[in-house]
Amino acid sequence: KEYLPPELYEQFTALLRKLNKYFSSYITIIIDENEGMKVSEVYESVQVYLSTRSSSAASRLKLNKPKNAQEFTFTMDKKQQIVDEFYGLKVWWILHSRELKQQMFSWNSVSDEKRYFELKFHKKDKTRVFDTYLPHVMAEAKILELKNRQRKIYTNKGGDSRSYEYRNRIWTPVVFEHPATFETLALDPDLKDDIMQDLQKFSQRETYYKKVGRAWKRGYLLYGPPGTGKSSMIAAISNFLQYDIYDLELTEVKSNTELRKLLIATTNKSIIVIEDIDCSLDLSDRKKKGKKESKEDPNPAAAKPENETPESNVTLSGVLNFTDGLWSCCGSERIIIFTTNHIDRLDSALLRSGRMDKHIHLSFCGFSALRVLARNYLGIEDHPLFEEVEILIEEAKITPADVSEELMRSSEDPTAALQNLIAALRRAKEKAALVLPGSDGGVEGNLGAEAEELGSTAENSVTDLKGEKAPNVPVE
Ligand SMILES: Nc1ncnc2c1ncn2[C@@H]1O[C@H](COP(=O)(O)OP(=O)(O)OP(=O)(O)O)[C@@H](O)[C@H]1O
């Protein structure tokens, strides 16, 4: 390198490689970490497989202990070699890493480092490696993955702070350990059963979706005031189906192309969540109209999204394509969930059948939901004060989050907790009575509840496709 000019040096090393290949009795296979825009499944499987071999075979290891995992795991460090033997067959694995000279794209998904495994074996073993050894590696990795599987929640937030391990990936994973389940969710029992049956049916219908020519995915829209359990329900769905969650922060996505790349990089058996979709983007017809008509509008602020993000160029059509365009079919068994506190702000195109198959209205705490909370927080199934609570709760319009707060304050004394709750319900009822007469829905409700919900029933409800029952139900 010191004596030759760079061009000559390149040619010389290329020639040496060729000569080496010609005379060598070994074959080398390269397994790149990135496969187009995705992390290669083969690379990940090899990494998992080698983690069990590393501790005895390599001299320099990286020590990991995933949160809550029982045991340490070892992974190979760069330039380390592991020799693996399989029924008399001998192979060599080496992990390489090469710095890339320049960034090819501007956004942060692109690596500044290229990692790959090199698998070396004797030419005479070629057939055995391809027919037996590599399938064995893949199968073993699958078993190990299932054994150590921890559900993950992925985020597209991160940027420069990402660790070495995830710098090359557009989603950053964190172990997901939310305790919410359908058991602990305070919901109307019929609604709960309906959702659970729907999810169960969806997860078992691979052949059915294929038969009818549809992508195996389902869209849910969760809407209702803050504190009614939208996020808790997403966690419960993930725990019920054992799916990973991809929490998509739309304001971090700069273009429709980037949105597509994020979609492609999600895995099967996952829930893709866009929370507060009305706040993330300017998506509604009404808002556009609101802007045009701002001169006549006496209160234009009411029509504006809360966190407008002018720097994001993601459009409504980008989001629609994300949910049911051609690209949304890359992969299967996915649930897409949008949440909003203001369903009226969403564009009707977003709500139509096939996009959001199920609209779930989460509303104020009814008595049946309160029973669940009383069981969760106080450990009681019944109480003499329930009679009074039942009458008050239907009129007070209070969210499950507020009820939970009241119960938690004296969880060791159920009677005191219920008395506190009754006092809170009375206050909420009085406030609601003050707001309701003549209200046009523009006033803040009680205890964090939105006034626009005040006229609605205290029951949670579910509809397949907006406001319509059976006739339009897709697939089924
Ligand atoms: N239906 C419910 N069942 C059980 N707990 C609930 C329910 N709704 C709310 N909670 C409690 O209130 C807290 C807040 O609820 P959650 O974050 O799920 O509401 P949200 O509707 O997603 O609110 P936001 O719209 O503000 O995100 C949760 O931690 C949970 O303890």
Image (tube, rainbow, N blue to C red):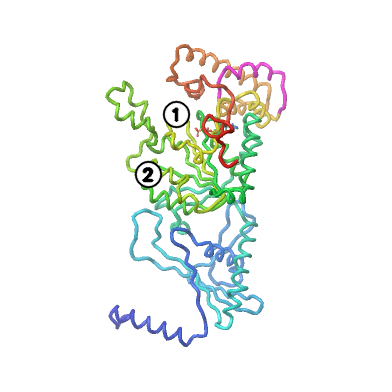
- Please tell me how crowded label 1 is: few (under 14), some (14-19), or many (20+) other residues with Cα within 10 Å: few
> Mark 1 highlights which residue?
344
Quadrant that contains the N terminus:
bottom left
Q: Is residue 102 above or below residue 275?
A: below
Relative depth, front residue between 378 and 133: 133
- Residue kind at label 1, given as amino acid type: Asp
Q: Position of residue 43 (x, y in %)?
A: 52, 64
> Mark 2 highlights which residue?
314
Q: Is 381 contained in the magenta span?
A: yes
Residue at 64% across / 23% down in the picture? Answer: 367
> Is ligand 1 less than 8 Å from the beta carbon at label 1?
no
Region of the chain picked out in magenta, as a range: 380-398
- Please tell me how crowded label 2 is: few (under 14), some (14-19), or many (20+) other residues with Cα within 10 Å: many
- Residue kind at label 2, given as amino acid type: Val
Quadrant that contains the C terminus:
top right
Residue at 62% across / 79% down in the picture? Answer: 89
Q: Position of residue 355 (x, y in %)?
A: 49, 41
User: How many numbered circles are shown?
Assistant: 2
Q: Earlier in the sequence, mark 1 or mark 2?
A: 2
Q: Is residue 19 left or right of residue 373?
A: left
